Image: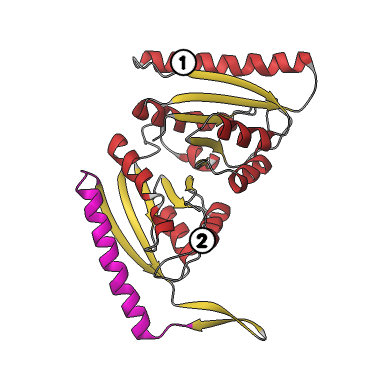
Amino acid sequence: MLEKILVPLDGSALGELALAYMKELAPAFNSEVHLISVYERRDAEYRRMVQGYLEKVAEQTSSDFEKLNLSNTVKPVVLDGDPAAEIIGYAQQKKIDLIVIVSHGHSGIMPWTMGSTVNKVVHNTRTPVLLVRASMVNSMHESVKFFGKILLPLDGSKVGEAALSYVSEIAQKLKSEVTLISVIELGQRVHTIGGKDYISFTEQQVESMMAEATEYLAATSKKLSDKGINVRSVMKDGNAAGEIIDFAKESNLHLVVMSSHGRSGMRGWVFGSVSNKVLQSGKVSLLLINAPQ
């Protein structure tokens, strides 16, 4: 599933935090690792500096794998052009299975801002993206596994389930604990002649949605537990994005995995809107999976 992992680096210590996540995933999936740096200056000496930096990181990464008796291939690649466009194009051309990138921060030796580049990559690539929250990595104890506790929001739709296979594979290989969460929204916004209005669901409607969600989570939990995965399920009500963000932070979870766009299922989410809010406001690292068109 994750045969090829791409890690874009800008020369900063912040950007290199993505390497820690990659080094947990790559051994488990025997992944080929692509380290990429993009420079915009047409300067031969500058290119040599970027090349030297990337080769040094690649050499250290290969050495780390060898110490663990691993044979993962590490490929350093230097490109010139617009960083976001080059990252997206390279991922598509090389059939990359996952991009791992730090979600914000200032750049290092390459004159591009990681935050702006990440935003463009996330919204324009079809490749799954793992956004590493720098503040979260810095606050985690060294002994904590980055994929130890995973949260998977589900709304009963095929869009939401696009992330399920990824969670299943990662959890089996890395022995992760998985929490499934479903949020029942108590109303919905509708378009009217005068604009948008909020209509509350009746108590009967909420109870019906709760029952349906409970049954769905139980069935999904069984599928995962039958594979030997330690799984539990949680029901919440309120604003979907807010409840997901708060629960992930309060429960000290390590990763949220979500589908990145599409229409929702039985509980009225618009998955694109919810995942975008979690992307913008969440504090926990986020794996975004593009649902099939």
Residue 216 in magenta?
yes
Residue projecting furthest to the right: 42
Work out whether 263 lies above or below 60.
Answer: below
Give residue 88's position: percent from left, percent from top: 61, 37
Magenta range is 200-229
User: Which of the 4 image quadrants contains residue 233?
Assistant: bottom left
Say which amino acid is labelled 1.
Ser
The quadrant in which the N terminus is found is top left
Instruction: Looking at the image, tell me whether mark 2 or mark 1 is earlier in sequence order.
Output: 1
Secondary structure under tag 2 reads helix
- Locate residue 222 relative to residue 92 in the image: left or right: left
The percent coordinates of residue 266 (x first, y second) are: 39, 70
Q: Is residue 43 left or right of residue 90?
A: right
Q: Nearer the viewer, residue 118 or 128?
A: 128
Residue matched to label 2: 274
Vertical side of 88 occupied by 206: above or below: below
Amino acid type, label 2? Val
Circle 1 is placed at which residue position?
A: 62
Q: Assess whether mark 1 and mark 2 are in contact (beta carbons under 8 angstroms).
A: no
Give x and y (percent) for residue 285.
48, 45
Q: Is residue 187 visible?
A: yes
Which mark identifies residue 19?
none
